[in-house]
Image (tube, rainbow, N blue to C red):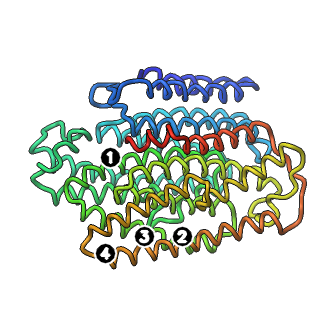
């Protein structure tokens, strides 16, 4: 099975060296193949050992890999018409896919890893390959941001590595060399003789992961990179790379819950609210699509982390799936919305003619309203369940009033973000001059795939699967 999972990426990597004019269509078709082995994983008994105890498929990581595969297909479809919106050479196309293949291999190892060391190697591989995907856009801004990402990514990945070393050291007296194994760490967490050392390691690992997701104190680097990159790169960041980071947070935090739940919850709660506090006002002041969607993504990842540590596993996973479909859809839509020039929000949803144009602005309108959790968006239900889990946690806390006050502050900050998105939507729909704009079939198909993904999240079978994780 591991060979089948890696085969599509190896095919894409090989095709990226072919200099034919039609190779970009073959590359897009090959990207569809990444979904097939992931679907096959659902049928296998869980946990399924792909490579001994090093790579293990379970209900959690198969779900995350499946969602990431769908995002990869949507990005491949949007790439077919990227040259209609921005200047990009055939060589740049091939180079993008070449590093996308390496990126996907790193993602597979990170998401399916049951070993802290392999998780880190996969994340590092995905990070380095993303640097070159940013540089696919041959502009001074993109080259500058690629170097910035290299520096920030190196800081984040180094923190994660150092934290892993401390966690390994805390568990080695009881597990020996198996102290790198996530499942064994979880099973023996209460036996760790140096819980303080583990908690310090977990805190450092978490800060490294939070930095990679644009949390406090590095809130703007992600928005700057996604603004300078091509639209598909931003979609990969929001829909796939953050998946590998958050699955690591899920794994580490489950162990930390067993060691000392109160310390874990307080640390993540304060960090996430501080992040959302800053991001809410950055969103309020933003003036272009890419920064708006990027900063909104940081807010949603902070909410997912909060719901998860509050015991709202179902809410966190439902919110994760909705975010993974909505945010890449909005980033890829930006390629069309900004066709008449960057930073033009007013009138962006006007000027589309024909059936394709009507369907495009209708889908984008739905995505914009869904991402701020208006019903029947999956995010509406995930936030209901998530805040319910937080209130349940507050009831069992010794600081009930402080917890309820913090939840109230969180709702106020989310209201600011809600107001900004409604204001942007009204400006896009009812203000500004109307210019004729063109939408291409592959872009519409990509958006429809994401829309179907959102509908699929609300199916009873999907909800039952998520509740079973």
Q: Which mark is residue 225?
A: none
In x, y percent, where is residue 112?
38, 35
In x, y percent, where is residue 432?
85, 68
Q: Are marks 2 and 1 in contact (CB under 8 Å)?
A: no
Marks 1/3: CA distance?
21 Å
Q: Is residue 60 left or right of residue 423?
A: left
Q: Is residue 58 left or right of residue 102?
A: left
SS at badge 3: helix
Labels 2 and 3: the sequence-earlier one: 3
Labels 4 and 2: the sequence-earlier one: 4
Identify the residue at horizontal 47%, vertical 21% (top origin). 4
Identify the residue at horizontal 50%, vertical 22% (top origin). 7
Q: Which residue is mark 2?
A: 414
Labels 1 and 3: the sequence-earlier one: 1
Labels 2 and 1: the sequence-earlier one: 1
Q: Which residue is mark 3?
A: 273
Q: Which residue is mark 1?
A: 251
Other residues around mark 4 within 10 Å, as few (<14) / some (14–19) / many (≥20): some
Above or below residue 65? Residue 365 is below
In x, y percent, where is residue 167?
22, 50
Marks 4/2: CA distance?
21 Å
């Amino acid at each position: 099975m591991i060979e089948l999972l890696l085969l599509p990426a190896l095919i894409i990597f090989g095709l990226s060296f072919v200099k034919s004019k039609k190779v970009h269509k073959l590359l897009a078709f090959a990207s569809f193949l990444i979904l097939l082995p992931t679907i096959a994983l659902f049928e296998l008994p869980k946990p399924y050992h792909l490579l001994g105890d090093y790579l293990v498929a379970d209900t959690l990581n198969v779900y995350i890999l499946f969602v990431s595969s769908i995002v990869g297909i949507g990005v491949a479809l949007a790439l077919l018409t990227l040259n209609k919106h921005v200047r990009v050479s055939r060589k740049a196309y091939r180079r993008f896919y070449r590093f996308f293949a390496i990126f996907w291999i790193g993602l597979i190892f990170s998401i399916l890893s049951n070993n802290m060391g392999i998780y880190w190697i996969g994340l590092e591989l995905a990070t380095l390959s993303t640097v070159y995907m940013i540089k696919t856009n041959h502009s001074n801004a993109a080259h500058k941001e690629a170097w910035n990402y290299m520096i920030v990514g190196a800081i984040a990945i180094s923190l994660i590595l150092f934290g892993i070393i401390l966690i390994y050291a805390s568990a080695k007296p009881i597990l020996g060399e198996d102290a790198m194994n996530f499942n064994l760490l979880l099973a023996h967490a209460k036996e760790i003789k140096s819980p303080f050392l583990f908690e310090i390691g977990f805190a450092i690992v978490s800060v490294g992961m939070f930095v990679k997701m644009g949390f406090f104190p590095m809130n703007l680097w992600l928005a700057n990179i996604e603004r300078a990159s091509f639209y598909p790169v931003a979609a990969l960041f929001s829909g796939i790379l953050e998946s590998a980071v958050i699955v690591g947070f899920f794994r580490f935090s489950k162990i930390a819950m067993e060691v000392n739940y109160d310390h874990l919850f307080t640390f993540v709660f304060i960090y996430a609210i501080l992040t959302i506090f800053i991001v809410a006002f950055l969103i309020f002041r933003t003036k272009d699509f890419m920064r708006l969607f990027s900063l909104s993504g940081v807010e949603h990842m902070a909410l997912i982390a909060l719901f998860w540590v509050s015991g709202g596993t179902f809410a966190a996973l439902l919110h994760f799936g909705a975010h993974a479909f909505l945010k890449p859809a909005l980033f890829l839509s930006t390629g069309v919305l900004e066709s008449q020039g960057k930073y033009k929000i007013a009138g962006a949803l006007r000027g589309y003619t024909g059936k394709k144009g009507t369907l495009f602005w209708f889908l984008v309108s739905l995505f914009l309203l869904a991402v701020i959790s208006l019903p029947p968006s999956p995010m509406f239900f995930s936030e209901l369940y998530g805040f319910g889990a937080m209130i349940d946690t507050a009831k069992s806390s010794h600081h009930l009033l402080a917890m309820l006050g913090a939840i109230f502050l969180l709702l106020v900050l989310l209201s600011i973000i809600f107001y900004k998105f409604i204001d942007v939507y009204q400006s896009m729909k009812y203000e500004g001059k109307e210019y004729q704009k063109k939408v291409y079939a592959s872009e519409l198909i990509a958006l429809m795939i994401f829309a179907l993904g959102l509908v699929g999240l609300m199916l009873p079978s999907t909800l039952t699967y998520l509740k079973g994780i």
